[in-house]
């Protein structure tokens, strides 16, 4: 339990700092680039994130699950996954560059888009290192790295924008931050003498591709689900609509720190004990859902009541049109809070097929709903579809868990995972002293 609370708090604080940095960065971009320029940046980011999922290929979740069950495989897993990540990142960037030169949404922003696309490499490699840390419940280190990335992006971005670099500066700031954090990850692993195994064979890569493919589909569908709104808005309503919608949605996403922190902390625990036989009572699924339901309802109520003042205060008068969309999106926040641990529970229990079916139906409903409502209702239509999609996501996952009896009776036993950790507490102190 101590490990869980430490990891939850470290993830909570780091995600809070990271989300705050991202939100401040979004506000600065919105004010410096105006709605159209901000919409162009968000469109670039949405496409890059969707294509960049190819480079992750579900490897992060596979690594966490497998290494949590067999810690001795850490170096071999790191070697194989990083080799595959590099190959996939090369393919993803080539595909992304082809889209930049062909899609009309990139007209006039080709150079910044190509620069931003380099984050496909840095994000994939950083995720590879962090997956090993997360598998051994060393979330304080991966949390620090995750918080450092947006903080460096914000710092570099303010400097670059102050020099009048515009979209070029915004894209370059993201690349700079990723390179700096990657260097920090490499230094951390070298300090612990954790490197790569001696060889990687084509058979190893093919086996990894096969085992990670279901995780890749899950991650790809999840990314498309949260990015398709911006892509379709740009095509059907223009960049200004993307900027207005993104202003509301970014505020919503910044509030997801609590469910994300808890889900990250319980994933390795539930992976080692998918049946829940030795999971502490306070970490049982029904307890986690209860606390997140209370928190989600309270948070959504505050956003719903204060949507107008929040938009005016954070973004300015130019974004007043985003207020109705934010009110609708605040209702979706409750379902988003509850869906995060449900997805993790299904993956930990090897129920990837259930997650794939759920996400496929959600993406289909999201896409069709946006195609129907955006031309008729604009921002309000996109927000309404997002609310509907999140409700479907939650309902289907509850249905699968209830049907497959994946919500076991509470157990009163406790576990201590410190013996399974790659880094012992004393080692962590040494790393802290060495910086």
Image (spheres, rainbow, N blue to C red):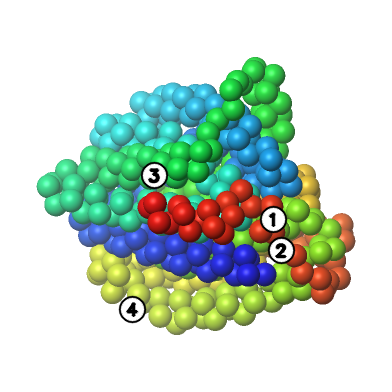
Question: Answer yes or no: do the residues labelled 4 and 1 have beta carbons within 8 Å?
Answer: no
What is the x, y in percent for residue 289? Answer: 69, 71
Front tag of 2 and 4:
2
Give the quarter of the image for residue 254. bottom left
Circle nearer the N terminus (1, 3): 3
> Tag 4: Cα neighbours inside 10 Å, few (<14), some, or many (≥20)?
some
Front tag of 1 and 3:
1
User: Which residue appears at 36% of the width and 58% of the height?
Assistant: 22
Circle nearer the N terminus (2, 4): 4
Distance in Å between CA atoms under marks 1 and 3: 26 Å
What is the x, y in percent for residue 292? Answer: 62, 73
Q: Quick one: SS at disc 1?
A: helix
**From the viewer's perspective, is 347 left or right of 173?**
right
**From the viewer's perspective, is 74 left or right of 402?**
left
| Residue 68 - label | none
Question: Answer yes or no: do the residues labelled 3 and 2 have beta carbons within 8 Å?
Answer: no
Residue 119 is at least partly visible in this image:
yes
Viewer-closest of 78 and 345: 78
The residue wearing badge 4 is 309
The residue wearing badge 3 is 184
């Amino acid at each position: 339990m101590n490990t869980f609370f430490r990891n939850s708090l470290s993830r909570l604080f780091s995600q809070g700092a990271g989300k705050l940095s991202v939100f401040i960065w979004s506000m600065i971009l919105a004010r410096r680039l105006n709605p159209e320029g901000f919409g162009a940046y968000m469109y670039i980011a949405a496409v890059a994130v969707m294509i960049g999922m190819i480079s992750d290929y579900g490897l992060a979740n596979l690594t966490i699950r497998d290494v949590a069950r067999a810690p001795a495989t850490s170096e071999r897993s790191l070697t194989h996954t990083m080799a595959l990540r590099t190959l996939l990142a090369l393919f993803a960037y080539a595909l992304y560059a082809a889209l930049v030169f062909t899609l009309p949404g990139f007209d006039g922003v080709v150079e910044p888009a190509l620069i931003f696309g380099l984050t496909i490499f840095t994000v994939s490699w950083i995720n590879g290192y962090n997956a090993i840390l997360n598998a051994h419940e060393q979330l304080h280190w991966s949390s620090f790295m995750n918080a450092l990335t947006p903080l460096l992006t914000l710092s570099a971005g303010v400097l670059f924008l102050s020099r009048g670099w515009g979209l070029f500066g915004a894209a370059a700031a993201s690349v700079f931050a990723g390179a700096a954090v990657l260097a920090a990850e490499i230094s951390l692993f070298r300090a612990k003498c954790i490197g790569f195994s001696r060889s990687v064979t084509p058979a190893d890569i093919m086996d990894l591709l096969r085992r990670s493919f279901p995780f890749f589909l899950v991650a790809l569908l999840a990314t498309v689900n949260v990015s398709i709104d911006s892509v379709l808005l740009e095509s059907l309503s223009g960049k200004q609509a993307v900027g207005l919608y993104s202003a509301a949605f970014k505020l919503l996403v910044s509030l997801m720190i609590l469910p994300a922190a808890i889900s990250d902390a319980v994933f390795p625990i539930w992976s080692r004990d998918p049946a829940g036989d030795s999971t502490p009572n306070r970490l049982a699924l029904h307890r986690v859902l209860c606390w997140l339901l209370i928190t989600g309802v309270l948070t959504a109520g505050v956003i719903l009541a204060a949507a107008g003042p929040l938009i005016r205060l954070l973004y300015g008068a130019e974004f007043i049109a985003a207020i109705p969309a934010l009110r609708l999106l605040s209702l979706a926040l409750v379902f988003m809070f509850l869906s995060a641990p449900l997805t993790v529970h299904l993956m930990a229990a090897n129920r990837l097929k259930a997650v794939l079916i759920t996400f496929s139906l959600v993406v289909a409903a999201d896409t069709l709903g946006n195609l129907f409502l955006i031309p008729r209702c604009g921002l309000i239509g996109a927000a309404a579809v997002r609310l509907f999609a999140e409700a479907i996501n939650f309902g289907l996952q509850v249905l699968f868990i209830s049907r497959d009896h994946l919500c076991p009776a509470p157990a009163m036993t406790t576990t201590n995972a410190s013996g399974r950790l790659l880094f012992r507490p004393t080692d962590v102190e040494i790393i802290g002293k060495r910086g």
